Image: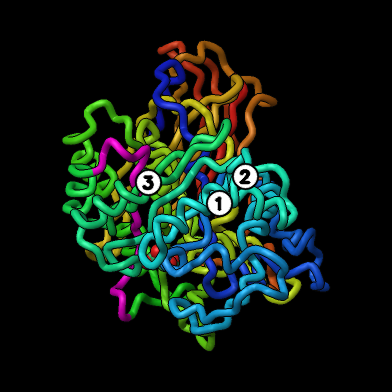
Amino acid sequence: MKKLVINTSDAKSVINKNIYGHFSEHLGRCIYGGLYVGEGSDIPNKAGMRAAAVDALRHIRAPVLRWPGGCFADEYHWMDGIGPAGARKRMVNTHWGGVTEDNSFGTHEFMELCEQIGCEPYVNGNLGSGTVREMSEWVEYMTGDGLSPMSELRKQNGRADPWKLKYFCVGNENWGCGGNMRPEFYADQYRRYQTYLRSYGGNKIYKIACGANSFDYDWTDKVMANATRYMDAISLHYYTVPFDWRDKGSATDFGEDAYYMTLQKGLRMEELISRHLGVMDKYDQEHRVGVIVDEWGAWYNVEPGTNPGFLYQQNTMRDAVLAALTFDIFNAHADRVVMANIAQTVNVLQSVILTEGDKTILTPTYHVFDLYKEHQDATAVSHWIESDEVGAGDAKVPRLSATASIKGGTLTATITNTSATENASIDCELIGVGKALPPENICGKVLMGAINAMNDFDSPDKVTIKSLEGIEATSVGAGNCANIRFTLPACSVAAISLKL
Ligand code: AHR
């Protein structure tokens, strides 16, 4: 029996709902054929958006969607994607698969998609190959409310009112695909470009600087040293690659060694966030600047027979556990991690949705977003979990991980059992709850399966959320605390809600 202690009266930070954000790029079948099927499609859609994907994203209350890239962002010229669809420029998507990009999904379509999902748009501007004017005019086009050339153009294209746009990032991975810049050079470019991102009318742009690749603390140091006062947040990208970049390993065909190795590498997110925050502290003692992990997730070899440039991979319980552990890290840093965006929403990398023709399925990772959704905008409360290590060979990870938060009088505790083979019995003590909770106030759900259990187009519901049976509420103990006891199956993620 392992102990979990939750102190319901020790409030921490509010967990920004945007930690549960998404990222969708013009890459493979994420936008085209995935989220966007076109109005003429036989696949059920509204204004061209795949209805099943929109419904699924609404269900998990997707709070924010980043677009159009990724590496694509620094090659994207937004004017190519406005105006009558048939007259839009066609180009080659040189980064991803060399396929034709017909620009039928552009600014208007992205904003429509966000409106349908009910999420905030997060736009990534082109610094690498675009001009200051182009970036400035894009913001004017989307948000300009007065008489101006770009708001007139928007009106001509059928949208009278400006959109509300808060989140805007100046370039993507400018240390790599976004121009191979040195951090000092990027910082100067950032200062210049952001100057012309105007806030029109009631719209205020929240400016995001391109941050580091994984462990590159020098990038954070130099960009912060030179540009802190011009930014609201800085990004960070980290992908979990079980082996190495040349052979990343299969998404589905793996054993316990690769399972634990993946989790162990994923858990390095904690070190990354702590150390980048430490560097930021040198230049931002008041903690005004937030961190946005706008690309994270597992990256495996593509599914056999698929276009290597499309980054299509399946998704298993390993990914579900990885997502839960990652959320626990973000939630623990909720005072400074203001957003995160999984890469990517549909059909690319650690997707929450996979599609094949008219079929749409939800991945194990999707269900973790569902289990964690009550943490959105809830207040984290302190917890302590008794946890030894489990693993294979050198790859060791904590057996258990958790987040606890309170919103509207309900406590949500999400708990993960990383062990591939062993169930875990938990005795959970709720400090600050001086009464035994009646059974009707307690509800448990669980996602579980073998480490490589997955959903596919023939069996879409193999891995889904089930009710967690057998939660026992014990009477108020000696410490005047309510207790509950339950068992977590091996390789599982659970959410328990308690009406206090
Ligand atoms: O998500 C796939 C790619 O990974 C993105 O385009 C890029 O920003 C990162 O390297």
Placement of 47 over or under 442, stated as above or below: below
Residue 240 belongs to the span the image colors magenta: yes
Amino acid type at image mark 2: Cys
Quadrant housing the C terminus: top right
Sequence order check: which comes first, mark 2 or mark 1?
A: 1
Q: Which residue is mark 1?
A: 65
Residue 446 coordinates in the image, percent (x, y): 58, 47
Nearer the camera: disc 3 or disc 1: 3
Front in this rendered view, residue 105 or 296 = 105
Is 446 on the left-hand or right-hand side of 297? right
Front in this rendered view, residue 20 or 423 = 20
Quadrant housing the N terminus: top left
Residue drawn at point x = 62 percent, y = 63 percent:
106
Residue drawn at point x = 54 percent, y = 44 percent:
494
Amino acid type at image mark 1: Leu
Q: Quadrant of ligand 1?
A: bottom left
Residue 73 coordinates in the image, percent (x, y): 46, 64
Residue drawn at point x = 40 percent, y = 61 percent:
131
C-alpha span from label 2 to label 1:
7 Å
Residues packed near mark 3 inside 10 Å, few (<14), some (14 to 19) or many (20 plus): many
C-alpha span from label 3 to label 2:
24 Å
Are the residues at dot 2 and dot 1 in contact (C-beta closer than 8 Å)? yes
Residue 119's disc number: 2
Amino acid type at image mark 3: Gln
Q: Which residue is mark 3?
A: 194
